[in-house]
Image (spheres, helix red, strand yellow):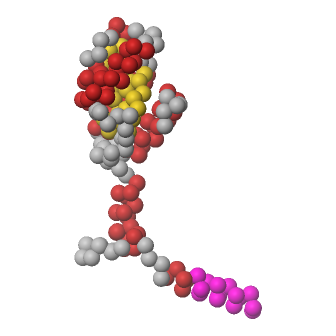
Amino acid sequence: MRRGLTYLWTTALIIACCTGCTGPWQAVDRGTGTAADAMRTTNLTARTRTAADPRLQVDQRVADRVARVPGVRRAAVLVAGNTAYIGVELAGGTQAGLAEQKKLAIISAAKAVHPGLRRVAVSANPDVYHHVQGFARDLAAGRPVDAVWRNFRSMVERVWPDVK
């Protein structure tokens, strides 16, 4: 009997305490919906970012300028904050590593177009170029940025582990 009353009082206390809880998820958009509708809308917009999210952007102007560097056939550029990630395809299909002089020319070209860049990561690996190009296509197609961002961060950690 005593145990039953303890459970009853504990349950009543929990219900009484939680009833007064309020938060942004309980906001009601007056005249258009209920608290549940407001919660669904809030959660949806909080988790699903669009390509307009400033966290990850395609910068075609930088890509066009980098592609004009001698020895570079094409470039794909993604900018996250003040860091540019550049994948280049070298002219002549060379698979050799990127010479330091050419790398510096690519970095200079990127910073000339986008002066706010503090870090520029460059790779001549064909796989990196195709991955960056694929991420740019995904963003242009309207794929949620969070999904693209996770895949992008995974690639960055493998290719440029020292870039944060």
User: In the rendered image of this protein, does residue 140 appear above or below residue 90?
Assistant: below
Toward the viewer: 27 or 87? 87
Residue 27: image quadrant is: bottom left
In which quarter of the view is residue 41 placed? bottom left
> Is residue 79 placed above or below 87 in the rendered structure?
below
- Residue drawn at the location 42% of the way across and 41% of the way down: 149
Q: Quadrant of the N terminus?
A: bottom right
Residue 73 seen in render: no
The residue positioned 27% from the left and 27% from the top of the image is 112
Depth check: 71 or 148 in front? 71
Where residue 164 appears, as percent x and y from the top left, is 49, 37
* Residue 158 appearing in the image: yes
Q: Residue at x 37, y 14 (%)?
A: 102
Q: Residue furthest right?
A: 2
Q: Which residues are magenta?
A: 1-14
Say whether residue 9 is magenta: yes
Q: Where is 158 relative to 23, above or below? A: above
Q: Tell me, yes or no, whether the highlighted magenta stretch contains residue 43.
A: no
Question: Most prominent secondary structure in the magenta stretch?
Answer: helix
Above or below for 152 versus 19? above
**Could you tell me residue 50's position as x and y percent?**
32, 48
> Number of numbered discs present?
0
Which of these two is toward me, 146 or 66? 66
Expressed as whole percent of the image width and height from the top left, the position of residue 118 reads: 38, 34
User: Which quadrant of the view contains residue 134?
Assistant: top left
Q: Residue at x 44, y 76 (%)?
A: 22
